[in-house]
Image (cartoon, helix red, strand yellow):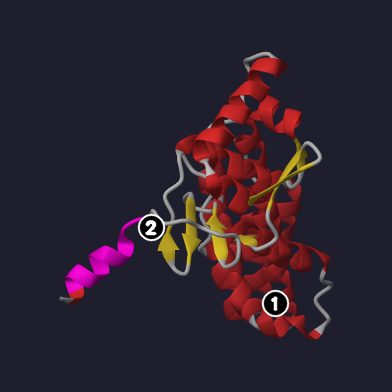
């Protein structure tokens, strides 16, 4: 009975939706959930919801030209009207359509908005306030966040995906520095390694790992991290680490021989 019940809960909910308590997932996958259940949404409407979630309130003509970039403005607007008409009542329940503009209704929450709020707070923080008490939770969220809408290749998605990726990497690196300054070196290493895992060829992420190990007094760990970075950059890019990176281990360079 329990297995049958679990399968039923996983099935998309085809009943009517409303904006209150509705959550849109864009990180790692596309999913619209209400009361813990997935809501079935046509593919074209998925793209519309994603666009409005990422860019906020938009003029109808801008929405149309973004979703149908290879057609004329009039044709694109016609496609948008047809999409909304075919979607039916659910469109009015999830979208605010006033004065020629479209937006998500206020009751719809979006995982990207939550993640951006965390990253903006981290990037503005100077490491001295009491907010560091919540940084361990931030590490977990940032380290396990998926890419924006994987498998989607629209130009507007690619731009937003890269923007969020860069924000995430900078946030993890800064978070590592904050944690190290508070003496929380294990958490700092975790954040720095998460940045390396997200982009193995990013030197600043490797540099952060080295800095955290040195801050804790673990010279051997720092040297190993430097060697891994140097080998990876040599094999994949054919270059040596920057002078900034080499400067970190310069006082211990004799130990590498």
Percent of width and height locating residue 70: 62, 16
Q: What span is colored magenta in the figure?
A: 3-13
Residue farthest toward the left in the current orientation of the protein = 1
Percent of width and height locating residue 171: 70, 61
Horizontal relation, residue 221 to residue 135: left or right: left
Distance from the alpha carbon under mark 2 to that under mark 1: 46 Å
Q: Main secondary structure of the magenta part?
A: helix
Q: Out of 98 and 49, give the one closest to the viewer.
A: 98
Q: Out of 191 and 153, give the one closest to the viewer.
A: 153
For label 1, the SS is: helix
Q: Is residue 249 visible?
A: no
The residue sitting at 56% across, 60% down in the picture is: 18
Decide: marks 2, 1 in contact (CB < 8 A)? no
Circle 1 crowding by C-alpha within 10 Å: few under 14, some 14–19, many from 20: many
The residue sitting at 24% across, 64% down in the picture is: 7
- Tag nearer the camera, 2 or 1: 2
Examine the image and state in which quarter residue 127 appears.
Answer: bottom right
State the mark number for residue 13.
2
Q: Out of 177 and 123, give the one closest to the viewer.
A: 123
Circle 2 crowding by C-alpha within 10 Å: few under 14, some 14–19, many from 20: some
Q: From this view, report whether residue 87 is shown above or below residue 90.
A: above
Q: Which residue is mark 1?
A: 180
């Amino acid at each position: 009975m329990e297995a049958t019940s679990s399968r039923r809960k996983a099935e998309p909910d085809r009943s009517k939706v409303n904006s209150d308590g509705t959550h849109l997932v864009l990180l790692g996958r596309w999913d619209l959930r209400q009361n813990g259940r997935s809501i079935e949404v046509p593919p074209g409407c998925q793209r519309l919801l994603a666009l409005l979630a990422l860019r906020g309130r938009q003029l109808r003509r801008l929405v149309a030209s973004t979703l149908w970039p290879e057609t004329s403005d009039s044709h694109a607007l016609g496609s948008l009207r047809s999409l909304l008409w075919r979607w039916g009542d659910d469109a009015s329940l999830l979208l605010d359509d006033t004065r020629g503009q479209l937006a998500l209704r206020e009751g719809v929450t979006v995982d990207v908005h939550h993640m951006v709020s965390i990253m903006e707070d981290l990037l503005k923080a100077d490491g001295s306030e009491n907010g560091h008490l919540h940084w361990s939770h931030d590490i977990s969220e940032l380290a396990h966040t998926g890419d924006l809408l994987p498998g989607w290749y629209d130009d507007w998605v690619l731009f937003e995906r890269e923007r969020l990726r860069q924000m995430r990497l900078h946030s993890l690196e800064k978070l590592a520095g904050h944690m190290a300054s508070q003496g929380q070196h294990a958490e700092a290493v975790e954040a720095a390694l998460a940045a390396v895992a997200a982009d193995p060829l990013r030197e600043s992420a490797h540099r952060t790992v080295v800095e955290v190990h040195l801050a804790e007094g673990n010279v051997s760990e720092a040297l190993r991290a430097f060697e891994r970075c140097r080998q990876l950059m040599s094999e994949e890019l054919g270059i040596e680490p920057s002078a900034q990176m080499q400067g970190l281990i310069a006082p211990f360079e004799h130990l590498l021989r």
